[in-house]
Structures are given as C-alpha cells and as structure tokens.
Amino acid sequence: MTPADKHSTTSPAPPGLWFAFRRFLHDRFSLDEDKDDEAAIIQSISRGIEFRGINLWTLIFAIFIASIGLNVNSTAVIIGAMLISPLMGPIMGIGLGVGINDLDMILRAMKNLAIAVLFSLITSTLYFLVSPLHVAQSELLARTSPSVWDTFIAFFGGLAGIVAGSRREKISNVVPGVAIATALMPPLCTAGYGVATGNLIYFAGAFYLFLINSVCISLSTFLIVRFLGYQQKPYPSAQVERRVRTTIWAAVVVAIVPSTYLGYQLVRKTIFEQNAKRFVDAEINSQSRQLIGYKARFNRKLPTLELTLVGESLPADSLAKLKASMPRYDLNNTNLVVKQGNFKDANVDVDAITSTITDQVIQYSQASIARKDQTIDSLRRQIERTNLSRLPVADLRDELKTLMPDIRTFTASRALLMTATSARPDTLLLVYARFSRPHSTAEKQRIENWLRSRTKSPRVKLIVE
C-alpha cells in the first residue's frame, strides 16, 4: 500500500447534510451558552424555599389581594397578586432536590410548601368568611374545573422558569410570565372560598388544580436539571432512592391521569355545545313560530337539547324531521325536548319570553332611530350643499354695476358641463350679461376674472350681448 493509498483510507469523509443539520440544531437549541454556575443556581433556588419573615408576609398579602380579585371578579387584581406571590420557590426546590438527589432539600421544600399552603388556606378562608360578597364569580368558577390543559400550561411554564433561572443574565420577563401562566395562587384562594362556604366540590377542584400546577412545575424543573447534567448526590441507600422515585411517579400519575379525563370531558362538552348551536341556527327557522331560547345540557350518557318556542305548535311530522336531521350535526344520541305553546303554557319561561321581546323591541327602536338619524344627516348635508351652491345673483348684479354701469341684463347659474371623451361631468359657472355698448376682449376678461374671484368658481363662461 502506497502512502497515498494509506492517507486516502484514514482521512475522514467530508461532513454531509445530516451532520450540518445536527450542528445547526445544536447551535440553535443549546442551553450551555450563558449558563450560570451550578452552585449559584442551587443557592438561588434554595434561598427561595424558606417561608419566614418577608416571604411569609408577602404570601399573606398576596393571598388577600388575590381573594379580593376573585371576589370582585377583577382579572387585573388577580394578575397583580400572582406577580408578587413567592409560591414558586419551594415548588422549584422540590424539583431541584429530586434532580440532584438532595433529600434534605426535598424535605425542606415540602415542609415550606405545606406551611405556605396552610397559611394561604387560612388567610383566604378568613377573608371569604368576613366578605359580604358570597356569589361565585366567573374568575373563581374558572379555578374549580381543572383539565389536562392546565397540566400542559404548568409543565411548559415550569420549563421556561427553570431555563431562565439557570442563565447568568436573568431574563426579567420570564419569571413574571410563568407566575401568571401557571396561576398557583388563585386556586388556593378558591379552595379557601370552598372552605368558607362549605362547598367541598369547589375546594376539591381548586386544590387539585394547585396540585397539578405544583407537580408539573417540579417535574419540569427536575427534567431540566437532569438535562443540564447537574452533579447528583448519592442517596443514603437504594431503598430510599426507590422510595423517592416511586413517590415522584405516583405524584405525576395523580396529577395527569384525572386531569386528562376531565380535559377529555371538557372537549366533548364544548363540541356538543358547538354542534347544538349549528343545529339551532340552521334548522330552527320559521315565520309562524319564534325561538325564545335553547339550552344544551351535556351528559356523558344522554345529552339534552331543550328548545323553547312560541307561536304555532310544531306538528308531529315537523318534530320528527327535526329529530331525523340531528345526526347531520353529530347529535346522534341527543334527547331533543321542545317546549311550545302560548304565554299561558306553564312549560314556557315567561320571563325569558318577556326579556327576548324587550330586547327585540329595543333593537328595532335603535335601528329605526339610526335610520332616521342617517336620513336627517343626509338632508342636512343636502341643504348645506344647496346653500353653498346658491348664487347671490342680485348682489352680483349690483357689484358688477359699479364696475360696468352700462349693464342692462344679468343672470348667473351653476351648470354641469359634459365632454365627448369623459363620462364624468364638470361644474361650470354660466353667466349671461347684456350691456348698452360693446365691450372689448380685455374688458370681458376682466369681468370673468372678477366673477371667478367673487364666486370661487374655477371655471366661468361669460356670454355677452
């Protein structure tokens, strides 16, 4: 084998497309750039675990603010409470402790998280006990029905939080965004509302939502810590390691599986309501009867669509056609209930009818007033244009008489001038004048210039006799 042959067999092949693509992905998605020191990150997260002094007072104040926001249904107030809440500290501490096998950090974070949850529940419960407002508003109700979407939000929010926290130059807008997106504090306040009002369903749903957020944020922190290759401590024994891992996966299953089922039911309910609306809009249309309202009640076994009609009663064959058309809108197993009759019918919601008729009268009156306003504005503009276009012929005659005392006859009007090459007319000031003597071209030009300046008309046609 010659040296040239040996060199050709040992030289590496030129990088191909796949190598270049991997290099591009690595350069774009690498988390090594601007990564802070491992000890500094651990120390920073560890400082946020403790709930004593300023952290505990800040938590209590934030709980009061969030409870007030939920009570008065103010989104802005709730967001402000989430921004000042220190609840992220122990939750990320649990994930970090699991990631580096630091059992002491895990236990310390869990202890402080339990303290934070306890004080949060006590504070929110006390507020809702003394608050004169006891109606559950939409912002509060939204925290009582967790779903798999909340799992995704908390997981990806936790990923963003730990990635931003591991940078040397902290990204200032990430941590507030994570606090708003994951929404740790409103569920605890809603759970306090459930305790204050004795509503265990509200308490269970809200506390489960908080549990979902906490587990998913801890899980995302654990995954990023392992991905960044932080140094792990050895567990005291294999039994302790196995117990920790089992606890982690049990918590993940508890958070994800029920929320997935609830999310699936939420999707089914939303699709059913959309299909019911399509059915009502397309099929319930008649001049002899009027739809007062409808209710789409979702049920896993037998959903119900209830229609309230007034006017002529719906014949049996028409009702059968309506039921036969329901499969076209994916309402195969839906029970159709039609309430119809006159105002004396007990099955008809008279309040709903009155409200609907009142709304229609108001809408018709508003439309009628709007049409009349448009007509009045149009007439006003027409009058203004007429006044602007009206020529003061007598005044023009008297003024022209001072310039040309020999004038005998005078008239002026605005006319439309059409050309053979254009379909758009032009405006022309047409003036007729008769004098007692002939005038020169210069004098006629002087009269035209005066008319053009006096009437603000760009085009003037003077006819002189």
Image: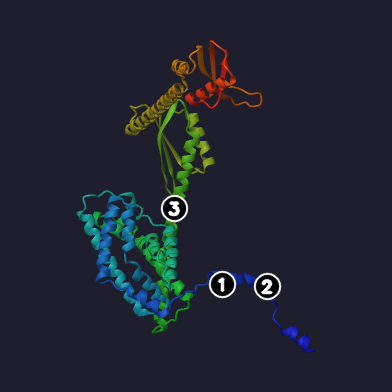
Percent of width and height locating residue 371: 42, 27
What residue sits 69% from the left and 76% below the top?
A: 14
**Residue located at (34% from left, 70% from top):** 89
Q: According to the image, label 1 marks what residue?
A: 26
Label disc, if present, on residue 16 of the rendered structure:
2
**Observer able to see residue 400:** yes
Q: What is the crowding at mark 3: few (fewer than 14 residues within 10 Å), some, or many (at least 20)?
A: some
Marks 2 and 3: in contact by CB < 8 Å?
Answer: no
Foreground residue, 85 or 260? 85
Say which of 170 and 289 sits in front: 170
Amino acid type at mark 1: His
User: x, y (%) of residue 29?
Assistant: 53, 69
Query: Left or right: where does residue 344 sit relative to residue 38?
Result: left
Say how the picture is coloured. Answer: rainbow
Which residue is the site of mark 3? 265
Q: Who's the residue at 27% across and 52% down the image? A: 71
